[in-house]
Image (tube, rainbow, N blue to C red):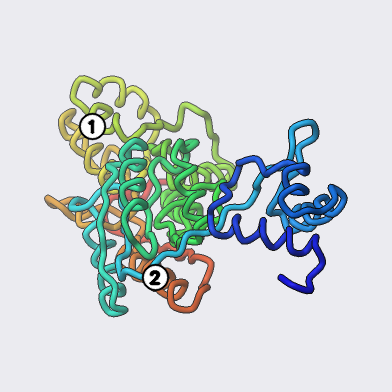
Amino acid sequence: MAGQPKHVQVSDWIRERILSGEFKKGSKLLSENELAKRFGISRQTVRQAVGTLVNERMLERRRGSGTYISYQPKPIREKTGNIAVVTTYLDSYVFPDIIHGIEQVLTAAGYQMQLGITYNRIKNEGNVLSSMLSGQVDGFIIEPTKSAFPNPNIKLYQRMLEEEIPVVFLNGYYSNLEIPHVSMDDYMAGRIATKAMIQKGHQRLFGIFKSDDIQGHFRFSGFVNSVQDAGLSYDDSDVLWYVTEDLRQFFAPENDSFLLKRLEGHSGIVCYNDEVACLLCETLRRNGKGVPDDFSLVSFDNSQLATFGGLSLSSVDYPFQEIGRTAAAQLVERLEAGRGPMGASFSPKLIERGSILKMKK
């Protein structure tokens, strides 16, 4: 521009091409000689112009190599009214309640859902996220897949953050990502479930927990800390861990002897969720053992399975619809107001039924 110092004209010229996308992030800038010749100025003036953009973090000097573009403009995203909702499962267990809660809030706010299901498999999660990112969505509500494990899809989440796409995690989270999450306080849930056993006089407790989701780790921590706080003995052999893919095989009839052997000497069992508790009850029935006469059980989720088929299972209530509604409300607030609450943690409560036997002193 006329009247501006030469170094300002050069820095403005470079900046415009970075912001337009003509100069791509990672590409090498024209050399000082090339810029000096193009603008008819000295190399010292070029250095001054480049220095301005280095200070703005648009350029990066690399000794012995040159100067490179270090900034990439954020793509302009048009509002679509579509929200990507990604869960591990869809039509079984507690997931219809979660999705119903999300749908209530999104519909009232004028948004519609695009559902993606991962079946708690990392490859599926990558495919779902890639597909939805290539389309047009305004934000994501995501239940993480195998949230306790290192995630190969981290670059997809980093892309969401770089493009400033609002994301809210549901039920769990990835510890290396600063993304708000809405979930139960699973550590306290583990403590409440375990204390219910201890208060009924159980001295030897056993735990079955899921190792690939972070909820399992928190529930285990609540379990083991409560056992130790009560002055009871704990050993690694008092816990069995499983991963998603192995659940059914874990409770297959051919494994009954192994499982029953591990349970010997224990009177109370803390199960990762109601599904695990039901599968365990089937194993016990096959082997002539019952709940609570032979083993007392406590679980998590307070789903329909807790009372299915005559079962009367004590279970920590998990307000799935409310968690879904809260996650959706927080995402909508971030979309409409530009920012919103940074997640939420729900306090657990135990729904006591008949699966915990009071031990005789």
Is residue 123 visible in the rendered structure shown here? yes
Q: Secondary structure at mark 1?
A: helix
Kindly indicate the quadrant of the structure image that contains residue 39: bottom right
Above or below: residue 282 compared with residue 331: above
The residue under label 1 is 248
- Which class describes the residues within 10 Å of circle 1: few (<14), some (14-19), or many (20+)? few
Where does the image place residue 162, in percent across and percent down from the top left? 53, 55
Q: Nearer the viewer, residue 171 or 16?
A: 16
The residue under label 2 is 326
Residue 191 in the figure: left or right of residue 349? right
Where does the image place residue 186, in percent across and percent down from the top left? 46, 54
In the picture, the quarter occupied by the N terminus is: bottom right
Q: What is the total number of numbered labels drawn onto the structure image?
A: 2
Residue at 39% across, 38% down: 210
Where does the image place residue 208, in percent across and percent down from the top left? 38, 37
Residue farthest right in this picture: 44
Amino acid type, residue under disc 2 in the picture: Thr
Residue at 76% across, 37% down: 62
Is residue 198 visible in the rendered structure shown here? no
Mark 2 vs 1: CB contact within 8 A = no
Q: Earlier in the sequence, mark 2 or mark 1?
A: 1
The residues bearing labels 2 and 1 have C-alpha atoms spaced at a distance of: 32 Å
Above or below: residue 29 compared with residue 343: above
Q: Secondary structure at mark 2?
A: helix
Amino acid type, residue under disc 1 in the picture: Arg
Q: Nearer the viewer, residue 150 or 203?
A: 150
Residue farthest left in this picture: 309
Residue 335 in the figure: left or right of residue 7? left
